Image: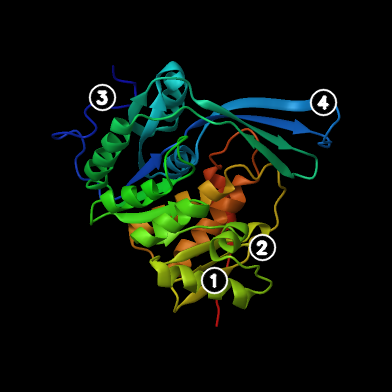
Amino acid sequence: MRARGGLPADQGGRGNAFPRIDRMILTVCLSPSIDVTVEVDALEVGKTNIARRKRRRPGGKALNVALGVARLGGDALVTGFMYRENAETFEELLDRGGVKHSFIMTEGRVRENYKFIDHRSMLTEVNDVGAEVPAENLEKLLERVRRLSAVSRVTVISGGLPRGVDASYYGDLFRAVAPGSLRVADATGGKLNAAVSAGVDLVKPNLGELENCIGREMTCRQDMLDACRELVRRGAKTVLLSLGKEGAILTDGKENYYCRSTSVAVNSTVGAGDAMVAAAAMKMAEGAPMPEILRAGTAAGTAAVTTFDEIAFPREKYQEILESLQVKRLF
């Protein structure tokens, strides 16, 4: 069966299904989820909390990246694992967002994750454990990535892995990406290490993820740059370090740039990192220089926190913020 904006799930790009599009961005979703976002006045552990607002939404970091690319006017295509019982919910979301999709279908239901946001915009997350993926589907996805990345300017692999899948699978996926496609990783822990070891064009940790990966605390900008250079030595060509409301750093180990974020009303930090990856990937697809990639990523991440109902940031807000940002070259 073919979804309205989808492609035959078992074909995945055979023949002429995907003509070469120089700016096509492929995103790989390994562990989709239903994100249940609950807004409370103050989250108190061990007590009864009253929800002021609640929303259920299909989620997954790679899906969010694809929706962000489409919001910016780019061509996005999602592959990865999907579960038959509620796949239609995800397909409808992507169809509405103008995103093509070609999933590897697995039996079962998509897991549910809970995100609690209090009046200070502090985020507390409780993530469900999803169903296992059969070994044959792991092989199918590697082949799907080989095929689809061959017609994509950038391939983004982000988020968690299905239950029981070793972190080394992240490295397998990046090694499956076609040589002509730029590779972007947004992952944590062993997945981040596996991606970097496989060689990526850009990796986007936040400060906590970078500290965990390197194994030490960072108290100043020099510490951050030294840690980013360590990732470059391990195999990443560039590192986009997200600093939240403080902005972001981009380095290739030789040239180092910093962009301070602008002050905005924060409604939710959910999806901010995915928005940053979407805008950075768009600029990479265009062949933009490092300062432009950094400025766009910072603008998109900032625009994303201004929304509650929509993870895909408003394009108008992105443009407004983009025009206000300046990039500074660091030592």
Residue placed under numbered mark 2 in the picture: 246
Q: For the view shown, which residue lies furthest in the right direction?
A: 47
Q: Quadrant of the N terminus?
A: top left
The mark nearer the N terminus, 2 or 4, is 4
In this rendered view, identify the residue nearer to me: 24 or 9: 9
In this rendered view, identify the residue nearer to me: 16 or 32: 32
Residue placed under numbered mark 3 in the picture: 8
Quarter of the rendering containing residue 226: bottom right
Residue 50's label in the rendered image is 4
Q: Quadrant of the C terminus?
A: bottom right
Residue at 40 percent of width and 65 percent of height? 236
The mark nearer the N terminus, 2 or 3, is 3
Crowd band around label 2 with a 10 angstrom C-alpha radius: few (<14), some (14–19), many (20+): some
* 17 versus 283 height, above or below: above
Q: Marks 4 and 1, Cα distance to the nearest angstrom?
A: 42 Å
The mark nearer the N terminus, 3 or 1, is 3
